[in-house]
Amino acid sequence: MMEIKDINDSVDNIELIAFAEKVNILNASNGSQYLAVSLADKTGRIEGRKWAVEASEIQNFTSGNMYLVKAKVSTYKNIYQLKINAYQLLTDEKLQEMQIDRNDFMRKAPIDFEQTYQEVVKEINGFHNGTYKAITLSLLKKYAEEFKNYPAAINIHHNVVGGLLWHSSSLMKNVAAIEKNYAYGVIDWELAKCGAILHDIGKIYEMNGIIADDYTLKGKLLGHISIGSEMIGKMAEELKIANDDVVKLQHVVLSSHGKREFGSPQEPQLIEGVLISTFDNLDARINHISEELEKVQEGKWTQRILSEDGKMFLNHYKK
């Protein structure tokens, strides 16, 4: 059975097993409906189209399920795409019959989840500030499984199982990496590191699961930044902590997108907020651009990336 990473110009008609990460019902120019499907396995993602679908097909092809797909390979703007000719829903019973573990097909962060989580906990355990330490460790303990397994986003960046841990721990490592070089700075490095870990903690309530294809009602109406600040406040109340450090930690979370037009309820007024918003943006951009570059061959240009002001990027380097 073919994997997504093996799709290239030399293949035509293929069969593959993949998750339907996202399914959209769209209207063609002739008025007929078709399905735009984002398919994924552990090796990559690819877009597929099922043209001229019937009502029953719309009901049968839904996000979160696994399918055996028969399709024709084509290219659109230098990116491989599938014209889906036929598909079969793989129920849990069918997967068991085929001796397939759905976990083997999930896109996962390229880290050891448990080891990375323990490294984060160990780092924070060594902090001197009791407020930052107690709140961060308590939230990590309370939401350990969600923090280790949730994605960091639905579409834009680190949208894989374990993406939240991957992204958050990367920010903390980035802060640690510059600590020596900026030792002269008037910076509370413990606040910055705890802010790195907690800046997206609200996403465990914002998204609808580990294989997230939509936002929850709370996520849509409040957003993960406000939710994260609320989580910090509630944990401080549970721990009976009431001081200015709680407010500082909330501020770093509330300002983590940098500017109001980028979704921050508050713009950074602490230098630690500048650090986290800068690294948050950098980490997201590197991840998203890299994923788009992986979709095209060396020497080819990506499609226009909306989050990069619609710019295209050249895949000029063989990794």
Image (cartoon, rainbow, N blue to C red):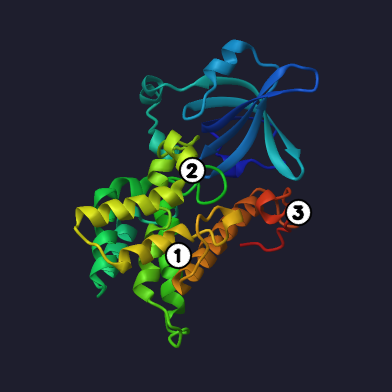
Which of the two residues, 10 or 318, is positioned nearer the viewer here?
318
Residue 108 visible in this rendered orientation of the protein: no
Q: Residues within 10 Å of mark 1 (few under 14, many from 20)?
A: many
The residue lying at 65 percent from left, 48 percent from top is 295
Marks 3 & 1, CB-CB < 8 Å contact = no
In the rendered structure, the answer to whether residue 164 lies left or right of residue 285 reads: left
The amino acid type of the residue labelled 1 equals Leu
User: Marks 3 and 1, Cα distance to the nearest angstrom?
Assistant: 30 Å
Could you say whether the residue bearing mark 1 is in a helix, strand or loop? helix
| Relative image position of residue 317 (x, y in whole percent) | 68, 63
User: Taking 166 as reference, is 128 above or below it?
Assistant: below
Which numbered marker is on residue 171?
Answer: 1
Q: Residues within 10 Å of mark 3 (few under 14, many from 20)?
A: some
**Residue under circle 3?**
300
Residue located 36% across and 25% down the image: 96
Q: Nearer the viewer, mark 2 or mark 1?
A: 1
Image-based side of 194 in relation to 58, left or right? left
Image-quadrant location for residue 207:
top left
Mark 3: amino acid: Lys
Q: How many marks on residues? A: 3
From what the image shows, is residue 200 above or below residue 121? Answer: above
Q: Say whether residue 47 is left or right of residue 272.
A: right
Residue 40 or 166: which is nearer the viewer? 166
The answer to which of 144 and 257 lies nearer the viewer is: 257
Q: What residue did someone put label 2 on?
A: 42
Tell me the SS state at disc 3.
Answer: loop
